[in-house]
Image: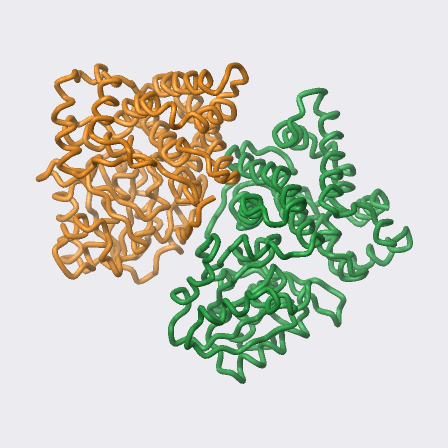
Chain colours: A orange, B green
Amino acid sequence: MNNFEFYNPTRIVFGQGQISRLSTLIPEDANVMVLYGGESARKFGTLDEVEAALGDRKVSLFGGIEANPKYETMIKAVEQVKNEGTDYLLAVGGGSVVDGTKFVAAASLYDGEPLDILKTGGAKLKEAMPFGAVLTLSATGSEMNKVSVITYDAAQAKMAFISETVFPQFSILDPVKTFTLPPRQVGNGIVDAFVHVTEQYLTYPVNAKVQDRFAEGILQTLVEDGPKAMANPEDYEARSNLMWAATQALNGLIGTGVPQDWATHMIGHELTALYGLDHAQTLAVILPSLLEEKQQQKQAKLAQFAERVWGMTEGDDAEKATQAIIKTREFFESVGVKTRLGDYQLDATCIDPLVQHLTDHKMTHLGEHQDIDLDSSRRILNRSL
Amino acid sequence: MNNFEFYNPTRIVFGQGQISRLSTLIPEDANVMVLYGGESARKFGTLDEVEAALGDRKVSLFGGIEANPKYETMIKAVEQVKNEGTDYLLAVGGGSVVDGTKFVAAASLYDGEPLDILKTGGAKLKEAMPFGAVLTLSATGSEMNKVSVITYDAAQAKMAFISETVFPQFSILDPVKTFTLPPRQVGNGIVDAFVHVTEQYLTYPVNAKVQDRFAEGILQTLVEDGPKAMANPEDYEARSNLMWAATQALNGLIGTGVPQDWATHMIGHELTALYGLDHAQTLAVILPSLLEEKQQQKQAKLAQFAERVWGMTEGDDAEKATQAIIKTREFFESVGVKTRLGDYQLDATCIDPLVQHLTDHKMTHLGEHQDIDLDSSRRILNRSL
């Protein structure tokens, strides 16, 4: 196991009916801005529930945060914060709303050009406005981590920033709130959480037994309960397990002391920025091809994955690795997320622009060995056609 | 899965050589009191390393904290805090030193009779002095939780208190520091961590898949790497896995949203208070008997435990449960912790006083169903002879 540091002060309040807890989780004299995405938050009653729990507190609303939240959108929220005298933010939505809220929390107290927060990856942040989240879509883990990914439209780029100042103070996870999600978002969430785990698990062994088994436990849960939630949207137990699995997938815990990859995410980000695929769709397309491309290097962990997650007992490590990649692709397809570029009306002509974007964004040494160079990325994209 | 709340703000700094990080983890102008147990902290160089890392900070020492730390001892540390003008505490040792330091942190800022902290279980605490820990024995999980158990000698009682004010600000976990432990303490630590997991896992199913698999992953790690650390004290990888497993066993995570038992601990506490057995020895004696006594009620989880932790595939659930209990007892014995009262020179005459103590301490409704009454406890003790 490698040396590591782990810190995560976000309070999780989990379960049916917990939105009412907002009445005690947010200071009574707070001037709250509620940030949300589309009209579903109003339509399905979540905003009403939130407003009721906030009671007499001063509340303003900022809606319309899109998937892959844009800098250009969030900067308007920062202006509204200043106009309203907001001193507490509340994200109501999925990972995009939480990510966007993190940016608003940081930029609202940042003494400088807000775009610098993205350009410096959050390194200069000293403080952020306190905020909490009411999660309505489980996928990204943003509800319990210090990472935010913002799309800067002017540069067609997804830019991440990381800072301990943007841990949510609390996140309320009510599985019932995920019952009304469209199937596409449920499938996307399952794939997103799955790939968050594999980015921290399918590398090379360092004998980190607790981390490996936690990773495998999350993957098994996604494999078992993902299809249940797809088949029966109101299966509370399946929804609960998926929600907690997705949070644990990216709250830092399973990544402690182990090598990490993240190449799938980095290549995938360019697919979203250039061609508008959903984040999870990009992961479903890239991961299986990347595992094929790096099968030999990752063979030991792929074989372990085959045995412990997929229950394979036959064959040598190479055969197990091959089968595990096939199983992974089939799983993504089974929850409705297609795994080929062709499924998204993209052909080989998309590859040059993607590789150019990777070059522009200095994504030239990816993966746990920093050996996924532009040629490797090109081969991975070719395998994804 | 049941509703739950999870919060754990302790920063973990893990790995070889990390004690030097004290130089940045503690405020530069802090007036630090270092609390420790016996002379091994000095003998093996840990105190020297700590003092070097603290640099020019004002430092005082408080040594001599015993296993099962006593109120009567810790109250002297509280006096020393006041005399020295201490404003930061640093525990250097195992769970007893960390537990004792939590009490000092709480009592030093408590406006009232310190014994009330124990009598009220920490309920009235509003603040505590900030503190960190350098862990030298992995077992109790105290390095990353909000619980402290203090022995009040005058009443022959072990009394727990729980408060969010006594989370360590940080804990440094350097597996090398555990190389020099005597085998008895290593075995005890393995058993303690193991039973922390089973208290949160061997109850009844609520379909909490992530929590179950995390629990099983910790248990498997203890089973695999415990004997390795016993056989080769300087096996860094085994020590690392044991250390992280023990921390994860009782930091609140695997207990979220699931029923919990804790009867083994409560009965065991009386064994320590009355007859001086090591904490882990009491757990090794009580757990197998308690599982036998409650085998039918716990059968579903015992069978799952048999399959997933012990790899059993043969027999029906009842047979698997029986075999899993036998395996558990054998495992405790294999790491040098005896599992019968007779092994500690106790016979049936000890039972009446133990049951009387349970009565006195209102331990009359234990277990996940609160149905381990005094008759049940008596039967469990009889099975332990």
Whether residue A38 is visible: no
Count of numbered tags:
0
Q: In this view, does B305 lie to the left or right of B374?
A: left
Residue closer to the observer: A315 or B277: A315
Question: Splitting the image into 4 quarters, where does residue A265 fall?
Answer: top left
* Image position of B1 with respect to B286: above or below: above
Residue closer to the observer: A239 or B154: B154
Q: Which residue is drawn at 36% across and 18% down?
A: A329
Farthest residue toward the left?
A154
Residue closer to the observer: A106 or A176: A106
Q: In this view, does A160 lie to the left or right of A209?
A: left
Q: Which residue is drawn at 51% across and 18% down?
A: A312
Farthest residue toward the bottom?
B83
Q: Where is residue B378 in the image (x, y as percent from the top left)?
A: 83, 48
Q: Where is residue A68 in the image (x, y as percent from the top left)?
A: 21, 36
* Image position of A283 with respect to B228: above or below: above
Question: Splitting the image into 4 quarters, where does residue A17 fall?
Answer: top left
Which image quadrant: the C terminus of chain A? top left
Q: Position of residue B219 (x, y in %)?
A: 61, 39
Q: Which residue is drawn at 25% across and 18% down?
A: A384
Q: Position of residue A153 (x, y in %)?
A: 11, 38
Whether residue B155 is visible: yes
